[in-house]
Amino acid sequence: MATVTRNSRVRRSGDVLHRDLEGEAVLVDLGSGRFFGLDEVGTRIWAGMEREASVESLVDLVVAEFRVGRDRAERDLLALLRDLAKRGLVKSRPA
């Protein structure tokens, strides 16, 4: 598994089902049967990965849609993507 960096491209794992529930998402890892929840921002990022996306484009999305500075958006986004990658919910590759 590649480490997620600001230069990565990321996509959802094909082994994950998701459902939007009132602005939040529930993810189900089909391999483990484990459930995961995403808040409003995480849900929007998940939607942004419907197709493979650059980390940079996801940072742009967060900055444009939420009241957050670019540095904070990038830091929090990378933390989320690294956690999702560690759990096998997203795949990454170098750009």
Image (cartoon, rainbow, N blue to C red):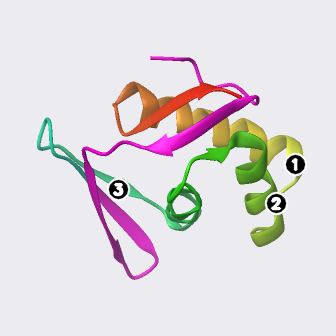
Residue under the point 75% across and 68% down: 66
Where, quadrant-wise, is the C terminus in this rendering? top right
Q: Are marks 1 and 2 in contact (CB under 8 Å)?
A: yes
Number of numbered discs overlaid on the protein picture:
3
Report if residue 35 lies within the magenta region. Answer: no
Magenta residues span: 1-27
Where, quadrant-wise, is the N terminus in this rendering? top left
Residue under the point 50% across and 63% down: 43
Please tell me which of labels 3 and 2 falls first in the chain: 3
Q: Nearer the viewer, residue 95 or 57?
A: 95
Q: Circle 1 — which element?
A: helix
Q: For this view, does 86 lie left or right of residue 36?
A: right
Mark 3 to mark 2: distance in Å?
22 Å
Report if residue 8 lies within the magenta region. Answer: yes
Q: For this view, does 49 lie left or right of residue 18?
A: right
Q: Amino acid at mark 2?
A: Val
Mark 3 to mark 1: distance in Å?
24 Å
86 vs 38: above or below: above
Q: Nearer the viewer, residue 69 or 94?
A: 94
Q: Circle 3 — which element?
A: strand
Q: Which residue is mark 2?
A: 63
Q: Amino acid at mark 3?
A: Gly
Q: Which residue is mark 3?
A: 37
Q: Which residue is mark 1?
A: 70
